[in-house]
Image: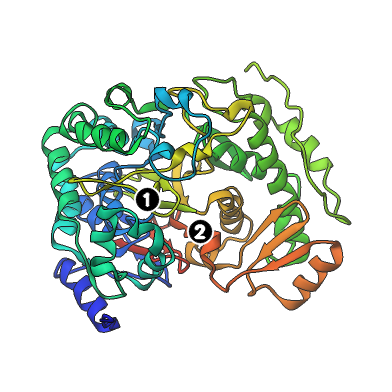
Amino acid sequence: MKRTALSSILIGVVLALLPAAAPPVSQTAAVTAASGMVASAHPLASQAGLAMLKAGGNAVDAAVAAAFAIGVAEPNASGIGGEGLMVIALPKAGISIAVDYRSTAPSRTALAKSLPSNGPGAVAVPGTVAGLCRALEKYGTMKRAEVLAPAIKMAAEGFAISPTLASIIKDNYEEILKDKGLARIFCPGDLPLEPGETLKNPELAESLAKIAAGGQDVFYRGELAEAIAADLKDRGGFLSKDDLAAYRAVERPPIRGSYRGYDLVSAPPPVGGLAVVETLHILENFDLSRMDPQSPERIHLMAEAMKRGAADWRAFVGDPDFVRVPVAGLLARPYAKARAAEISLERISGKIGAGEPDGRESPSTTSLSTVDKEGNMVALTQTISDFFGAKIMIAGTGIILNNEMKNFSASGPNALAAGKRMRTTIAPTLVIKDGRAFATLGTPGAARILTTTPLLISNLIDYKMGIQEAIERPRFFPADKELSIEPRLPAETVAALSKLGYTLKPMGAFDLFFGGAQGILIDLKTGLRIGGADPRRDGAVVGY
């Protein structure tokens, strides 16, 4: 029997889960607040983070609460069976750090003749629980039970699913039905859940409660580790209990750069912050502010810079515990100037190879941002790789596992090795001006992360856009001579780009292809927090 999907049901159930005096939640307009703010891909995750701020917690407490909650509210995109990376700035304490909780290759993957894109052989060691617990214990102020409470409640009591999530369930319907656990939660009675219906995952609530009580050891050495290892062994996977026990989240120095007087603090290798900052360093050689933001000249210059940043990222970036990454050389100003000199205003480049930096010695993802009353900032991106990851839910736990193993390369710095972290494009980024917090932002979107993030920063700095306007402006993505574009660009710009030689690939008006950015801007004059969330996803900003 077909289920009824009424928008009134969706709104009613969502509101019922919110605090009685909830602050404004907006998906299409900027939200302003005086003290603290959370921007995430779902209203309930944003509310979970805000509850920590209002209880006296800091930006890290809020980020961890929102991160656990978004794994419940957006189970297709992230969760405790996945991984991620968090960039933290605590200006008054003089701390800027990245917490790397990227997944690692199981030791037995060397036995594989080839790695599948999903299923048990695609599962890497999850890092989310270790990373969030480490960040909370070292840089937060609240107890695990406090920050996990909203996620536990949401998983146990359920919430109304959005049209976006319902559509993703339908798109993955056949794969979901192959796994009994996934089918029971997302397709009860073999029918996909529809908008407005309640999604519950009581077994996940129990798993989260165990983590709240016992910490990360429950997941990596205790009963959850036993369940994960046993289930995957039965399915023919490679991940073992020893792999889980050996996992550690690590702290790394963030990638640092600057753009027109603003300091950039971004995600270090093995992820994408290096490409973001290099792209902006290249663009600093051109006066973009003299160009209309939607002009063909500006789009062309940005596309050329983006292609070079991405080419160098592919050529040089891997797990820094296994390969030497020439960070200093790639971010050197003379190198950026040399890469900028390769760009012609009159023609487009085709396939671009890696450069030669000096000093080499030296689609399923979610992002969220938090700012507290002290000006501490967090940008966080986490994922299970593809939508619904490996398409596996561990029996009795409600945990959906990642399929990160497919992100290794056949050769080069990202080649597979036991215990190694695979390279991905996630790039949560902070922007600081004269030692003061200015912006925290991030986006999902696979390869589009490396192009959307510098585009957003350019919108904010070159054109002084508000955060919501910067997020909503039309996006583009270059791949050799092809340029994917949203149709909201001016007709004359599209014509000029075509004449320049681009093969244009039209996308939807607010296309999920381009990710779902979340961000918070701090007005340097008034101190007000101004949040923006992407209409391309179910984004929501809350503040107080």
**Which quarter of the figure is the C terminus placed in?**
bottom left
Which residue is found at the position 35% from the left and 58% from the top? 176
Q: Which residue is mark 1?
A: 391
Which residue is found at the position 48% from the left and 67% from the top? 536
Q: Tag 2: residue type?
A: Gly
Q: Tag 1: residue type?
A: Lys
**Residue extending farthest left:** 213
Instruction: Report whether 232 appears left or right of 175.
Output: left
Gap between marks 2 and 1 measured at Cα: 21 Å
Query: Looking at the rendering, which quadrant does residue 341 occupy?
Result: top right
Q: In this orientation, does residue 15 appear? A: yes
Compared with 525, 413 (above or below) is: above
Compared with 408, 36 (above or below) is: below
Which residue is found at the position 38% from the left and 40% from the top? 120
Colour style of the rendered protein structure: rainbow
Q: Which residue is mark 2?
A: 515
Instruction: Report whether 161 appears left or right of 167.
Output: left
**Label 1: few (<14), some or many (≥20) within 10 Å?**
many
Q: Secondary structure at mark 1?
A: loop
Compared with 306, 211 (above or below) is: above
**Which quarter of the figure is the N terminus placed in?**
bottom left
Q: How many marks?
A: 2
**Residue extending farthest right:** 346
| Foreground of the two, 340 or 242 | 242
Which residue is found at the position 29% from the left and 27% from the top? 244
Image position, residue 30 (x, y; %): 42, 68
Instruction: Report whether 488 appears left or right of 56.
Output: right
Image position, residue 85 (x, y; %): 41, 38
**Label 2: few (<14), some or many (≥20) within 10 Å?**
many
Which of disc 1 and disc 2 is earlier in sequence?
A: 1
